[in-house]
Amino acid sequence: MATELTLGIIKPDGVQKVLIGEIVSRIQKAGLRVIGLRLTHLSQQEAEAFYAVHKARPFYGDLVSFMIRGPVAVLAIEGENAIARWRELMGATDPAKAAPGTIRKDFASNIEENTVHGSDSPATAAVEVPFFFRTTELHRQG
């Protein structure tokens, strides 16, 4: 397996519920490394640009409104098979369908407020990570 870099976002509901430490702990316990981390409050324009891929979908407006509601924690996550492993830790998008012990099952309120985001492929990660982090802001060990 190759080392991958992926993006994680702890959404406004997760930040509001004071879950940043718990989620970072789960990432690290799974053997992944957080090599970039910052708290930010997305503007309307940033949220629209980040989720532009969903612009034609009926939930786009609500998603943008939710993502600008409060601060988010953005994480650059690195490790072997990091994309699939982070998505496994997150659980299904709909917390009602998520496996026990996943972040969404444990903490998400509903499909709209589902606590975390993760890149779904290497191509997506290659766009999403630089959206939030410059290369000099990623701190690899060794």
Image (tube, rainbow, N blue to C red):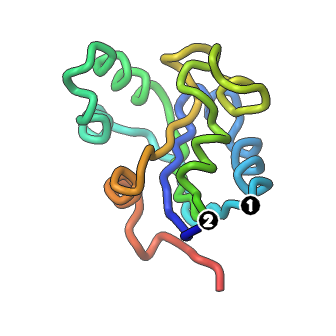
Question: Hey, which quadrant is residue 126 in on the image?
Answer: bottom left
Write down the quadrant of residue 29 in the picture. Answer: bottom right
Tell me residue 80's x, y (percent).
Answer: 62, 65
Tell me the amino acid under the disc marked 2: Gly
**Could you classify mark 2 by the number of other residues whose Cα lies within 10 Å: few (under 14), some (14-19), or many (20 or more)?**
many
Q: Which residue is pictured at 42% across the width and 50% down the height?
A: 121
Local SS, label 1 = loop
Where does label 1 land, which residue? 31
Query: Quarter of the image containing the N terminus?
Result: bottom right
Q: Is residue 108 above or below residue 139?
A: above
Q: Residue at x 70, y 51 (%)?
A: 27
The amino acid beneath tag 1 is Gly
Q: Could you classify mark 1 by the number of other residues whose Cα lies within 10 Å: few (under 14), some (14-19), or many (20 or more)?
A: few
Q: Nearer the viewer, residue 28 or 12?
A: 28
**Label 1 near label 2: C-beta < 8 Å?**
yes
State left or right for residue 28 relative to residue 117.
right
Q: Which residue is denoted by mark 2 in the rendering?
A: 79
Residue 4 in the image, given as x and y percentages of width and height: 52, 65
